[in-house]
Image (tube, rainbow, N blue to C red):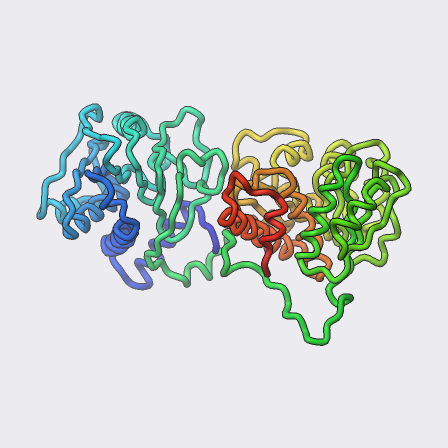
Amino acid sequence: MKLFTVEQIRQWDAYTITNEPITSVDLMERAAGAFTEWLLRTGLAETHREIFILCGMGNNGGDGLAIARLLYQAGYRPHVYVIRHSERSSDDFVINLQRYETLAKVQWLEDPQTLPLNETGVIIDALLGSGLTRSASGLLAQTIKQINASKAEVISVDVASGLFADQANDPDDVIVQPTHTVSFQIPKLAFLQPKNAPYVGKWHLVDIGLSQAYVDLTPSPYFYTDTRAIPVLPDRESFSNKGTFGHALLMAGSYGKIGAAVLASRSCLRGGVGLLTVQVPRCGYTIIQTSVPEAMCLTDEHETELTQPNDLSKYSAVGIGPGMGQAKASQQLLRQFIAQAQDIPCVIDADALNILSQERDLLEQLPAKTILTPHPKEFERLLGKPWKDDYEKLRLLQEFSTRYRIVVVLKGKHTVVASPDGEFHFNSTGNAGMATGGTGDVLTGVLTALLAQKLEPKEAAILGVYRHGEAGDRAAARRGMVALTAGDVVDGLRW
């Protein structure tokens, strides 16, 4: 699914209006109908005593008035308020105001303190929408403060009022904090940024029939990966053998952290690799042989640390870093590994990433088919500086991926895969239960398996991240998020 900026969405509306053709007010009617259908289907209109619809004077307010009319026609009696925040209103707002007032009167509001909001009602926020160009102020800001103070369930139409859809807000901006956001056609970039979580709630998409031709014609670097968009592994031929699906090497573990090697190994095997060798310190030999009998174990000469790279030429892909530690010998190991691995696809994770951030000259030497899998703090260390907001983080991520010609998987909610061609792929699977030790090691194993099966790094990262999150969702459904462990994620992997 392509994601678009606010300006592109505005052009998408205009393209649909011209080429369908359809009038702008009829397109607004279609959007209001989709929102209302969602609201009635969820039962939220039934479970609350009162419905308050708060409208601005632009097109988002027009959406709100159309929703109010449809609810009225369905037998509900919403309380409809228009905030008189401007001398002007949009044409489609005026048309929908006239249509609503054939059924009931709206209340024009000049003092938000008089709003009779209560925590037993549901508020539909139709104040500002996605076309916002400056921070909410005046009556609108006062109204937003009243909404947030009400403790009512809040549903924002398209985008929470006060939230910029594709750029950072100022820290002191006043923004609606909804329970739900019902967005038209596609998610907005703002929904996928960590710091915006309080201003999005749980988001939902409704289809309003915007032109598919525009999507096909319009480039975007932003994508949202759902089940329709993931790459696929080739079908397995009946005469395949274990050599067909690659031989992976995992270099992982140190004294007290052999569990990381176990988790990465188990997930690599679940990822479909034909053969797996695990290199661990000598202290990990018995653990690997008993915990992962399907893998071959190669022991380092050192008892507690990884110190010596082996001949890499026979491996289809290598994963390095989980539980490895950052001892001086391991730092030297990583340097030797990178020098030898120039023609081998590899995944670099965890302690290996932290060594890279200390030995920054190694970044210029990374093999061409490399995937890095940092969480935000690890990525900050790799950059050597913090970012001021989530959008600057994306810009720095794109520059980093392009400069070093590598794929970067920045982990978190909506994990983003950044590739050297400038694309960002935001993931749709996963849950907060996966914020537990070892789930990153599981991802490393999955990605290594996919590279060993000859997927290109970008495709391997997109597919691996999606299936990893999907496995976490299965585990959470079975165990609950609080009880979820990394081993549950391994058990949840499906292809």
**The image quarter in which residue 197 lies:** top left
Q: Nearer the viewer, residue 262 or 44?
A: 262
Query: Residue at image x 21%, y 23%?
Result: 113
Tell me if 457 is positioned left or right of 196 in this view: right
Q: Position of residue 140 (x, y in %)?
A: 28, 30
Q: Nearer the viewer, residue 224 or 311?
A: 311
Query: Residue at image x 50%, y 36%?
Result: 194
Q: Nearer the viewer, residue 361 or 314?
A: 314
Q: Position of residue 198 (x, y in %)?
A: 42, 33
In the rendered image, is residue 403 in sight? yes
Q: Position of residue 464 (x, y in %)?
A: 62, 53
Total of numbered circles in the picture?
A: 0
Q: Nearer the viewer, residue 324 or 169?
A: 324
In the picture as drawn, the residue positioned furthest to the bottom comes out as 239
250 in relation to 150, above or below: below
Query: Residue at image x 23%, y 36%?
Result: 121
Q: Position of residue 276 (x, y in %)?
A: 77, 56
In the picture as drawn, the residue positioned furthest to the right comes out as 301
Query: Residue at image x 79%, y 37%?
Result: 254
The quadrant of the picture occupied by the C terminus is bottom right
In the rendered image, is residue 91 in sight? no
Tell me if 361 is positioned left or right of 172 in this view: right
Tell me if 103 is positioned left or right of 321 in this view: left
